[in-house]
Image (spheres, grey):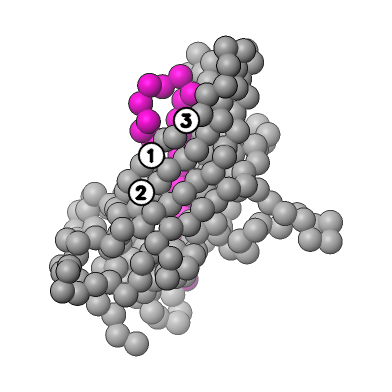
């Protein structure tokens, strides 16, 4: 289906949540399927995890789909907390358990499913805090938690604000394959008690197309 010329791309929101007070390094990961075929951030869209079939426990996408990223950072209300997202690094590992590509005798042709299939790593370094109250009120808020929301930084061309990536932060470019995506989020946290550097991680599985061999 991903190779059909009449295929309509689907856009997803990658939602990453953490709380500066948490002891764990686990970054709460959700890939959400947008309502409709729009590239905009939809942080409360339905979860896209597959619950049955060959991609169960992971996420099944198609070439030309797109992913936009939003980060929710929780902290204690009324505290003097300054949060700076220093960077998000994604590492794609071709899955050795793919039924069509059994390593080490055969390998998937693409090192990653997104942006540039010839590179296994991808960095997103520039982020901006979103002050839109819609996002704040839609967060999974609790009385003791306040949320800061970050999106990939936009740039300006001739005075008009545009996305750095025209359609999505992570356009899917691979035809087919299975990967484990390991993410590292670097964060600088400043409070009245001092400055802390934290790294949060996540590692979902992603399948593109059938996950198997494709022919041109």
Which residue, given by chain and number where applicable, does mark 2 sit on? 182
Q: Is residue 24 magenta?
A: yes
Identify the mark at residue 25; answer none if there is no mark.
none
- Residue 119, by quadrant, is bottom left
Q: Is residue 20 magenta?
A: yes
Give the structural element (helix, strand or loop) at label 3: strand
Which residue, given by chain and number where applicable, does mark 3 sit on? 198
Give the structural element (helix, strand or loop) at label 1: strand
Residue 65 shows in the view: no
Question: Residue 13: x and y, percent?
Answer: 48, 49
Q: CA distance from mark 1 to mark 3?
A: 10 Å
At 32% across and 48% down in the image, what residue appears?
A: 204
Mark 2: few/some/many CA within 10 Å (<14, 14-19, 20+): some
Q: Is residue 141 above or below residue 61?
A: above
Nearer to us of marks 3 and 2 is 3
At 53% across and 21% down in the image, what residue appears?
A: 75
Residue stretch in magenta? 8-28
Q: CA distance from mark 3 to mark 2?
A: 16 Å
Which residue, given by chain and number where applicable, does mark 1 sit on? 201
Ranked by sequence position, the earlier of labels 1 and 2 is 2
Answer whether labels 1 and 2 touch (C-beta < 8 Å): yes
């Amino acid at each position: 289906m991903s190779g059909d010329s009449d295929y309509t791309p689907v856009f997803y929101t990658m939602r990453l949540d953490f709380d500066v007070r948490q002891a764990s390094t686990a970054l709460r990961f959700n890939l959400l399927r947008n309502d409709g075929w729009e590239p905009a951030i939809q942080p409360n869209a339905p979860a896209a995890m597959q619950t049955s079939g060959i991609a169960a426990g992971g996420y099944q996408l198609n070439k030309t789909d797109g992913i936009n990223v939003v980060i929710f950072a929780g902290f204690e209300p009324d505290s003097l907390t300054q949060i700076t997202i220093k960077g998000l690094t994604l590492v794609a590992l071709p899955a050795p358990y793919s039924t069509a590509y059994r390593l080490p005798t055969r390998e998937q042709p693409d090192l990653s499913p997104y942006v540039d299939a010839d590179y296994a790593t991808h960095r997103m370094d520039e982020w901006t805090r979103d002050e839109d109250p819609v996002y704040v009120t839609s967060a999974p808020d609790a009385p003791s938690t306040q949320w800061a929301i970050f999106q990939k930084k936009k740039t300006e061309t001739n005075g008009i604000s545009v996305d750095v990536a025209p359609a999505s932060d992570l356009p899917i470019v691979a035809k087919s394959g299975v990967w484990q995506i390991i993410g590292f989020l670097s964060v600088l946290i400043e409070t009245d008690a001092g400055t802390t550097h934290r790294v949060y991680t996540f590692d979902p599985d992603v399948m593109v197309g059938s996950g198997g061999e494709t022919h041109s």
